[in-house]
Image: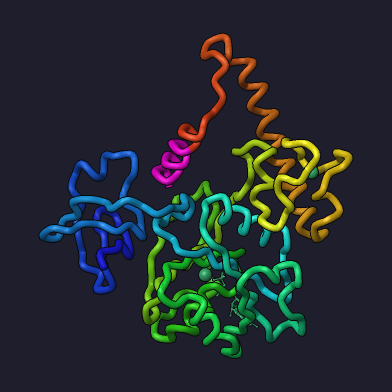
Amino acid sequence: MNQVFKIHSDFYYVGEEHKECKAREVLKKRNDKILTGDFVEVNDGVIERILPRKNFIPRPAVANVDQIVVVSALDNIDLTQLDRYIAFAVYYGIPVKLCFNKEDLSGDSAPDVYANYETVVTSAAEHTGVAEFEKLLAGKTSVLCGASGVGKSSLINALLPGLNLKVGAVSEKTNRGTHTTRHCEIVTVGDARIVDTPGFSNLKFDFLMPEVVGGLFEEFPHGQCKFNDCLHINESGCEVHGNVPESRYASYLEFVQEARDYKQNLKSTKTETSKFFGNRVEGRNTQKQRVYKEVEND
Ligand SMILES: Nc1nc2c(ncn2[C@@H]2O[C@H](COP(=O)(O)OP(=O)(O)O)[C@@H](O)[C@H]2O)c(=O)[nH]1
Ligand SMILES: [Mg+2]
Ligand SMILES: [Zn+2]
């Protein structure tokens, strides 16, 4: 399979055997650069063409992701952060699965709120649940995400003891200001392709309209509200408010607020600039281009 497993400076490592390739000049100049996870056509060690992408996430930049596995530490779950990852996965149109690690440090089971997600409970330290974790990943390209320290690298090491990914590595700075390489690498465990990430940083919903945020919560009753554009905050007759789990609703309110701040911001910049540029609202294409820009600037 001609999938790009790793990118380093001007070299692309293709397929499980990590064949070192270059890319045609024209591909490097285009808007959609070659990403880790891209399927490519290779001729004589040169990548000639990127095959159409099923999807991609910009940060870390990975294409053709089958699933996002959100890892949390069972002894210290950050529900808002977990909901943030889930909502982003839904936004990118990528299925989500959950892993609750560090079971050895907690007597709890996975929170009930997430019963509708495929979930595994693991301890990388005591090697429990690792077989289930492996099964969850089988045959797919998975991006592992979750805050730094939850045990993502330890879990991969538990699957592939020879690999020795750095655990608790300080070099995994996610700070946008520092120029650490954001390109990530696919590792294979059997037929599973896994992308370890240093954790996504700055995941805020400061780029979409508040009305869209509810759609990122799959269990919210959709289309049942009194008003089409119900924000589910304090509208009377709202079917969502009071009918969804409290922690999920709290996360929802937080994300809607970020989107509202964005919208407010957009309005004030628009009134300043509209005399020059007219009343152009940012469309999906512009958003998309911006996402590509973000990839490029990493
Ligand atoms: N007790 C316990 N510690 C763990 C477990 N998994 C990882 N750790 C520890 O948690 C710290 C962070 O692990 P790491 O794999 O680097 O997390 P990452 O930042 O998500 O990749 C390290 O000190 C690990 O040894 C676990 O299941 N139980
Ligand atoms: Mg790590
Ligand atoms: Zn409503």
Q: Is residue 234 above or below residue 142?
A: above
What residue is drawn where x is 58% and y is 14%? Answer: 274
What residue is drawn where x is 39% and y is 54%? Answer: 54
70 within the magenta span? no
Residue 140 shows in the view: yes
Q: Is residue 25 above or below residue 196?
A: above
| Secondary structure character of the magenta stretch overall | helix
289 within the magenta span? yes
Left or right of 229 on screen, residue 4 = left
Query: Which of the two residues, 104 or 130, is positioned nearer the viewer here?
Result: 130
Query: Which of the two residues, 229 or 7, is positioned nearer the viewer here?
Result: 229
Q: Which quarter of the figure has residue 104?
A: bottom right
| Percent position of residue 133, x then y | 54, 80
Rendered-image quadrant of the N terminus: bottom left
| Percent position of residue 70, x then y | 59, 66
| Percent position of residue 226, x then y | 80, 39
| Percent position of residue 208, x then y | 61, 38
Magenta segment range? Answer: 288-298
Q: Which quarter of the figure has residue 27?
A: top left
Residue 181 shows in the view: no
What residue is drawn where x is 43% and y is 47%? Answer: 298
Left or right of 230 on screen, residue 51 = left
State the count of labels: 0
Left or right of 205 on screen, residue 174 = left
